[in-house]
Image: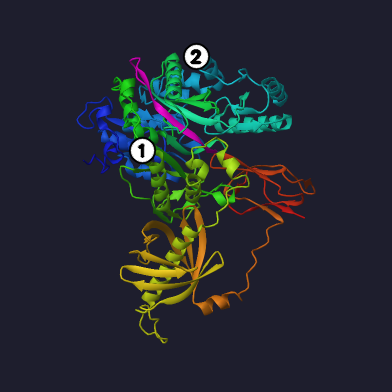
C-alpha cells in the first residue's frame, strides 16, 4: 500500500508490526501538520512515519541544504537561514516562525540540534505548538548530568562513584580525581554525542583533559561545566529504550549494545546485546522505567548504562529524545517509535503493556560516515558523484538523507546514512550486514564502508567480545587495510581478469583497427598485479562463465557482469562474491570485505616491461603542517622559532562539530606561521612551515 507522497509505510518495508501501534490509515489524530526541526536522515525518517499516518509535513532548511533530500520529501519547506547551524537550525525563533507561517501544530526535533533544549520546548509551549518529546522538567533534569545522577540515585538506579558538584578549575579537578581514584572520566554536564569528554589516568592528563573538555563543552552546548566520575575499565555501553505516555504508563523495549565506539561516538550498534542474560535485562529495564517515572517522562527516551565484565551496571545518562540507533529496536520489537512519539504527543495512551514487548531475532546498525579511516578518520565533504546503496527488504533497511549528485556539507555532521540488517540470529544478521556493505557503492567523498566491513568481520566482534575500547585496542596505530586471504585474492583476480576480457571484447567491435583483434575464444595468459604483487593466471571462456588457473588451482566462475556496472557479482566454485570495481585508466580499483586494492591486468610481456617503469616520488610536504580537512582554524599553539617536541600540540582545527588536534609527529622547529586563528581552511592548506 502506498502512502501519500509515494513512500511505502515503514510498517511494511521494514517489518514493523503495524497492529502494535494502531491503524496506519483512517485514524483520527490530533495533528494535521507537523514540522521537523532537523535535517538529513532523521528528518527523512520522521517524514516517512508522519506521512504514513496521514500527517502533512514541513521541512526547514539552511542555504547549504536547499537541495537536500529532506527538503524534497516534505510537503512544504521553509528557509531558516545561512549554513552555520547557529544561524539556522539552532535559532528557536526561526523554527517557531516557520510553524506559524505553515500552520504546523507540532514539532518533532529529531536528535541533536534543539532536541534536548528546554528553552525550545518552553518556547513552543508558549506559542501553543506541541513538542513531540518529553516535558520541560524532564529535559531539564536529565539534560544536566549532575542533576540526573542525583535523581537516578534517589530512584534506586545504580550510579558510578564520582563528584556530583561543580568543578571550579583544573586543580580542583585533580583533587577530585585523587579522591575518586584514577582513571577518571571528565565529561560535560550538559553534553552528549561524545563531545566534551576526556579520560585521564594521571594529574597531567586530568589538567589537560579538563581544559579541553571545558572548551569543547562551551563551544558545543554553551555550558562549560564538567563533572568527574570513576572510569570503568573494559566497559560495555548498553542502553534501554523507554516509552512513556501522558497517562502515567511507561514501558521498556529491550536493550541496545552500543559498545563499538570511536572517540565516544557510536559506530555499530545491535539489539539485543550478546552479553546480557534475561535477569540482567529485566533489572536494567526496571531501573530505566523507575528513573522515567521519577521525572514523569513522556515520549521515547533512552537510559544509558555502563556495564562491567561481571554484568554490574551503572547509570550513565538519559537521552530525552529519539536515538540515532532507534531502528534496531524497531526491527526486533516491531514497534514504530516515531509513530509512537507522534501518538503520545497527540495525547493517546500507549497501546502496549510491558508483557506485550517481545524481542524477535537480531538487528545490527552501521553508521555510514563521510570520513577517511585511512587518514585518522578525517571528515570528508563535497559532491557525492556515485551513490548506489544496497537493495532494501524486510532484512535490509537504509535510513539516509543523501542522494547521488547531492553534497556532504562541511557545516554539519558527516553521517550520510544508517544501514540496518536483521536476521533470526546474530550470525545471520552479521552476514546480511557483510553482504549489504559490499554492495554499498559511494564515490566522490571518502567513506567508512570498508572500515565497517572490517569491524563486523573481526573475530572478536563475531565472538561478541565487545568493549567501548574495542577500536582503540584492535587498531592502536589507526585503521590499516588487511592483507587479502587466498579466498579473497581469487575474487579480486576474477573481477580484474573478467573486466579485462570484457574491455578486450569491446575493442574487437571498434572499426578501423590496424592490428588483428585477440582471439577471446581461446585460453589467455595474463598477469594480474594486486598492489604491485604479480599473479600469473590463465583465463578461459566457457559456457556461462570462465575458468581460470593460478597457483596450481583451477577455479570455475559464473557471472553476468557487464562493463560499467560498479558491482562485480559472481560465483566462484559455488561461493557468492560481490566486488566493487571501478576502472581508472589502465588500473582497476577494487573493494571487498574491508579490502581496498589497485589491480592491473597485462600480457606476460607487458608485465615484464612494467617492472622497468620508474616510480614517481610523491611531493615532499614534510616541511609543512597541512590542514587534513576543510574547517575552522580554532587556534595555533606555536610561533616562529619555537621548537616543538613529538606529540606536542601544533594547532586545532574544528570541522563538522568536532575539534581535531594536530600534533607534531617528531621534534620540529617552526619557521613560519602561514595561517591565523579564525581562518577557514581548505583541505591541504599549509598552516605552518618548519625549518
Q: Is residue 551 above or below residue 357?
A: below
- Seen at 36% across and 73% down, the residue is 541
620 vs 276, nearest the viewer: 276
123 vs 430, nearest the viewer: 430
Q: Are marks 2 and 1 in contact (CB under 8 Å)?
A: no
Task: Please provide the residue range marked out in magenta.
Answer: 244-261
* Local SS, label 2: loop
Q: Earlier in the sequence, mark 2 or mark 1?
A: 1
Label the magenta part by its dominant secondary structure.
strand
> Residue 164, image x and y in percent?
60, 18
> Residue 632, image x and y in percent?
60, 44
Image disc number at residue 550: none
Disc 2 packing (10 Å; few <14; some 14–19; many ≥20)? few
Please indicate, yes or no, whether residue 412 appears anywhere in the rendered image: no
Q: Residue furthest bottom?
A: 514
Marks 2 and 1, how far apart in space?
35 Å
Please indicate, yes or no, whether residue 241 appears anywhere in the rendered image: yes
Q: Which residue is mark 2?
A: 156
642 vs 453, nearest the viewer: 453
Q: Which residue is mark 1?
A: 45
Q: Is residue 216 left or right of residue 130?
A: right
Q: Nearer the viewer, mark 2 or mark 1?
A: 2
- Quarter of the image for the N terminus: give it: top left
Q: Is residue 460 above or below residue 350?
A: below
Q: Is residue 364 above or below residue 522?
A: above
Q: Is residue 110 left or right of residue 451?
A: left
Amino acid at each position: 500500500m502506498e502512502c501519500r507522497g509515494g513512500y511505502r509505510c515503514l510498517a511494511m518495508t521494514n517489518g514493523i508490526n503495524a497492529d502494535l501501534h494502531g491503524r496506519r490509515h483512517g485514524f483520527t489524530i490530533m495533528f494535521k501538520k507537523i514540522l521537523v526541526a532537523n535535517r538529513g536522515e532523521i528528518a527523512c525518517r520522521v517524514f516517512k512515519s508522519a506521512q504514513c499516518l496521514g500527517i502533512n509535513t514541513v521541512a526547514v532548511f539552511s542555504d547549504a541544504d536547499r537541495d537536500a533530500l529532506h527538503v524534497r520529501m516534505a510537503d512544504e519547506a521553509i528557509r531558516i537561514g545561512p549554513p552555520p547551524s547557529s544561524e539556522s537550525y539552532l535559532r528557536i525563533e526561526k523554527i517557531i516562525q516557520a510553524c506559524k507561517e505553515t500552520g504546523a501544530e507540532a514539532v518533532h526535533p529529531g536528535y541533536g540540534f534543539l532536541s534536548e533544549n528546554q528553552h525550545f520546548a518552553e518556547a513552543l509551549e508558549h506559542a501553543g505548538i506541541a513538542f513531540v518529546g518529553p516535558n520541560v522538567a524532564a529535559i531539564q533534569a536529565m539534560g544536566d548530568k549532575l542533576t540526573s545522577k542525583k535523581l537516578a540515585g534517589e530512584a534506586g538506579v545504580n550510579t558510578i562513584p564520582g563528584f556530583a558538584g561543580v568543578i571550579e578549575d583544573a586543580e580542583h579537578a585533580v583533587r577530585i580525581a585523587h579522591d575518586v581514584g584514577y582513571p577518571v572520566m571528565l565529561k560535560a554536564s550538559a553534553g552528549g554525542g561524545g563531545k566534551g569528554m576526556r579520560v585521564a589516568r594521571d594529574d597531567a592528563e586530568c589538567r589537560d583533559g579538563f581544559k579541553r573538555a571545558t572548551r569543547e563543552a562551551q563551544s558545543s552546548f554553551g555550558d562549560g561545566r564538567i563533572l568527574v566520575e570513576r572510569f570503568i575499565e573494559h566497559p560495555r555501553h548498553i542502553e534501554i529504550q523507554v516509552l512513556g505516555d501522558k497517562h502515567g504508563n511507561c514501558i521498556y523495549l529491550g536493550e541496545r549494545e552500543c559498545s563499538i565506539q570511536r572517540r565516544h561516538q557510536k559506530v555499530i550498534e545491535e539489539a539485543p546485546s550478546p552479553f546480557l542474560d534475561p535477569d540482567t535485562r529485566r533489572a536494567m529495564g526496571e531501573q530505566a522505567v523507575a528513573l522515567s517515572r521519577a521525572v514523569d517522562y513522556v515520549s521515547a527516551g533512552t537510559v544509558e548504562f555502563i556495564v562491567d565484565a561481571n554484568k554490574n551496571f551503572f547509570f550513565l545518562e538519559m537521552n530525552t529524545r529519539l536515538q540515532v540507533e532507534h531502528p534496531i529496536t524497531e526491527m526486533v520489537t516491531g514497534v514504530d517509535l516515531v509513530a509512537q512519539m507522534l501518538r503520545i504527543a497527540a495525547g493517546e495512551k500507549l497501546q502496549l503493556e510491558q508483557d506485550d514487548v517481545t524481542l524477535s531475532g537480531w538487528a545490527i546498525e552501521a553508521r555510514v560516515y563521510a570520513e577517511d579511516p585511512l587518514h585518522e578518520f578525517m571528515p570528508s565533504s563535497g559532491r557525492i558523484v556515485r551513490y548506489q546503496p544496497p537493495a532494501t527488504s524486510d532484512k535490509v533497511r537504509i535510513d539516509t538523507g543523501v542522494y547521488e549528485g547531492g553534497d556532504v556539507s562541511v557545516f554539519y555532521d558527516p553521517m550520510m546514512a544508517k544501514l540496518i540488517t536483521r536476521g533470526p540470529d546474530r550470525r545471520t544478521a552479521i552476514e546480511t550486514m557483510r553482504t549489504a556493505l559490499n554492495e554499498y557503492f559511494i564515490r566522490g567523498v571518502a567513506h567508512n564502508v570498508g572500515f565497517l566491513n572490517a569491524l563486523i568481520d573481526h573475530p572478536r566482534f563475531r565472538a561478541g567480545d565487545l568493549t567501548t575500547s574495542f577500536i582503540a585496542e584492535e587498531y592502536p596505530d589507526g585503521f590499516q587495510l588487511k592483507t587479502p586471504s587466498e579466498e579473497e585474492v581469487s575474487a579480486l583476480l576474477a573481477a580484474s581478469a573478467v573486466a579485462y576480457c570484457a574491455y578486450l571484447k569491446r575493442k574487437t567491435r571498434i572499426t578501423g583497427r590496424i592490428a588483428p583483434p585477440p582471439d577471446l575464444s581461446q585460453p589467455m595468459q595474463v598477469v594480474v598485479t594486486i598492489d604491485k604483487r604479480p599473479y600469473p593466471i590463465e583465463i578461459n571462456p566457457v559456457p556461462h562463465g570462465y575458468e581460470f588457473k593460478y597457483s596450481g588451482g583451477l577455479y570455475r566462475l559464473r557471472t553476468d557482469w557487464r562493463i560499467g556496472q560498479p558491482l562485480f557479482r559472481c560465483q566462484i566454485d559455488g561461493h557468492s562474491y560481490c566486488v566493487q570495481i571501478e576502472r581508472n585508466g589502465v588500473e582497476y580499483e577494487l573493494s571487498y570485505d574491508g579490502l581496498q586494492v589497485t589491480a592491473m591486468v597485462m600480457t606476460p610481456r607487458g608485465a615484464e616491461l612494467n617492472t622497468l617503469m620508474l616510480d614517481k616520488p610523491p611531493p615532499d610536504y614534510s616541511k609543512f603542517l597541512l590542514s587534513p580537512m576543510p574547517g575552522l582554524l580554532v587556534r595555533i599553539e606555536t610561533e616562529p622559532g619555537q621548537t616543538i617536541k613529538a606529540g606536542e600540540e601544533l594547532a586545532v582545527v574544528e570541522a563538522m562539530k568536532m575539534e581535531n588536534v594536530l600534533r607534531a609527529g617528531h621534534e620540529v622547529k617552526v619557521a613560519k606561521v602561514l595561517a591565523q586563528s579564525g581562518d577557514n581552511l581548505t583541505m591541504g592548506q599549509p598552516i605552518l612551515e618548519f625549518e
